[in-house]
Image (spheres, rainbow, N blue to C red):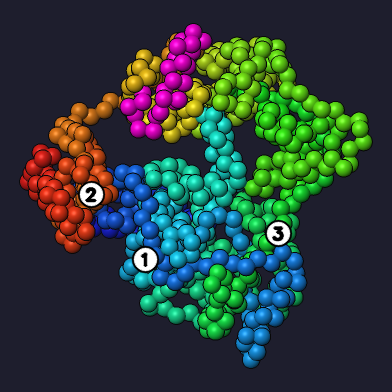
Amino acid sequence: MNRTAAESRAAKLRTVIEEHNWRYHVLDAPVIPDAQFDALVRELAQIEETYPELVTPDSPTQRVGGQPQEGFAPVNHRTPMLSLDNATVQGDLRDFSRRAKDLAPEAVPEYVVELKVDGLAVSMQYEDGRLIRGATRGDGEVGEDITHNLRTIPSIPLRLRQPLTLEARGEVYMPRAAFLALNEERAAGDMALFANPRNAAAGSLRQKDPRIAASRSLDIFVYGLGFSRQVSPATHAEALELLKALGLRVNPHIFVSRDLEEVIQYCESWRERRFELPYDVDGLVVKINGLSLQELLGATSKSPRWAIAYKFPAEQALTRVEGIAVQVGRTGVLTPIAVLVPVRLAGTVVKRASLHNEDILREKDVRIGDSVLVQKAGEIIPEVVEVLTGMRTGGEQPFTMPENCPACRARVSRLPGEVALRCTNPACPAKGMEAIVHFASRNAMNIEGLGPSRVARLLEAGLITDAADLYRLQDRKPALLVLEGWQEKSVNNLLSAVEQSRRQPLWRLIHALGIRFAGERTAKLLAEHFNCLDALRTARPEELEAIPEVGPKVAGSIVEYFGLPSTHDLLSKLRAAGVNFTQGAKKAVSRPLAGKKLVLTGTLPSLSREEATRLIEEAGGMVSGSVSRNTDYVVVGEKAGSKLAEAQKQGLPLLDETGLKEILGQAGQK
């Protein structure tokens, strides 16, 4: 394909991909299968790789890329992003309506009601339809630039369906399923868990590396128009319809009425229904619909007078602690679990609640027989909020964490600086079961259909003793078929999933091994750096610590893990089973910029910023976002800004695109 044909085809592909992306993420009505969509994206990526000068900033291939950010630049909001006053009872909504009528006695207000999604408020600025900047709410006047992370969210269009200049505001959130999967992954790596989906979403948006945000399954609902030069809707509801027509994702649950009592009834209808949603909602937002009336009502220094948040209290339930069990995790951590009299809470029946660790158990003084208040942290994870000591009868029994592991009776210990008690037995059966469950989990070897109950059954039947034995199950099919509840179809599906997992990429295997402190992100870094498991297995601590994001704690854990005889035995069995141990051959490339720090400023004639960054990194260099005395070169294009002035002030070497290509050995390339 010549360049002219490639340019035409790339433009067509971008349009088609954007259309299907909009149908999938905004309309929730895809018209082609995922495999066909992926093929279109691959075709576009191949064209752009062949003709890098054809890459555009809003290309679907450019959602994730570039170096991690060094910091978060401040962004001044054109119009303040004010916080909302809260209403907690119906009378607060009536007071809100009365105040509005006192300020505008001639008006007959219409109300619009939206779900209050529990996430992080952001603004997105579009110029001529292209996303140029995204920011957090911050203090309402000044937020932080998080454009690099917002670009990774598939439901945020990089280009609107019309070339308008405007600011849209929305709430970025993490779906409940994604939150649970993320915490499961962090638990597997012995990392701190997020308390709720909102904290997880906020933490993801404040990552300096956009690849981390891209892995977190974030989504957004756009809830308002900050400003616009070319459109002027009469009502908030019209503004939402406009934003939806432009390709932005708007929540479908919107209610409009002039009757305040209808509004109150609608709000109350969501008190229970909200638990049926796949994302967290902590209330509803009631707004005056007419934008001219909003302007007339104005705002206080903190909140608009034309909107209020009707918030639901955290739902709690009273129950009794029937017992306290101790659960042994994959890394040997002992976790106390309150066994409760079943109680309905936030839409589900709760029977167990984590007490987290020995310190929290003592601090809350939870005893067997206690009456307790429970709630769901982030409306997902059951937790004991409070012990009602006034209801004690004297028959409650204090609980002490065991000195021996409940699974194997080995001694437990508490390492300095840790809150967790751990089983000291490397061969503890509870640790072995959890290790196999983790090995087969979705974010590890992804052996579908092999959950905790099936792993437990295989262990009980003596068909496996460790994860490597999963690859011998094909030879034990007759024994599988006689297990109670196991049918030929389910057995065949399991064996097929096990067979497919042999070819999983190296990072999945590293993650599946369950090395303490090494989660999915670290596994990918290790696979990329070492390229094969044998090189990682023999790596020295200092070599590991040289990898970005791998500190002494992680490095020490990796070295300790690969030094265990049990690890040697497991890897030998996995190798014999034909499990993939390699990342794939790396291309041999020249590294003329090894150790050099470069800054890009302005627009280069033929290279996009992303392409220039990639070429510099492949040549061993690093691209920084700011000029400093440690900068080796400043690459200057058209409309260079303050970075050029600073470089000239410091007398730093300057390069144009031709000079950069000469260093890279690409002179003469178009």
Percent from the top left, x then y, of residue 76? Answer: 39, 65
Counting labels gives 3
Percent from the top left, x then y, of residue 365? Answer: 77, 34
- Amino acid at pointer 1: Tyr
Using the numbered discs, state the Cα–Cα distance from disc 2 to disc 3 in whole angstroms: 48 Å
Prevailing secondary structure class for the magenta stretch in the rendered image = helix
Residue drawn at x 36%, y 49% is 71
* Circle 3 residue: 312
Residue drawn at x 60%, y 30% is 449
Residue drawn at x 16%, y 60% is 638
What mark, if any, has residue 550 been given in the picture? none
Task: Classify 183 as above or below 565.
Answer: below
Percent from the top left, x then y, of residue 52? Answer: 21, 48
The front one of 559 and 102 is 102
- Amino acid at pointer 2: Val
Task: Classify 378 as above or below 252.
Answer: above
* Circle 1 residue: 126
Q: Secondary structure at mark 3?
A: loop
* Circle 2 residue: 627
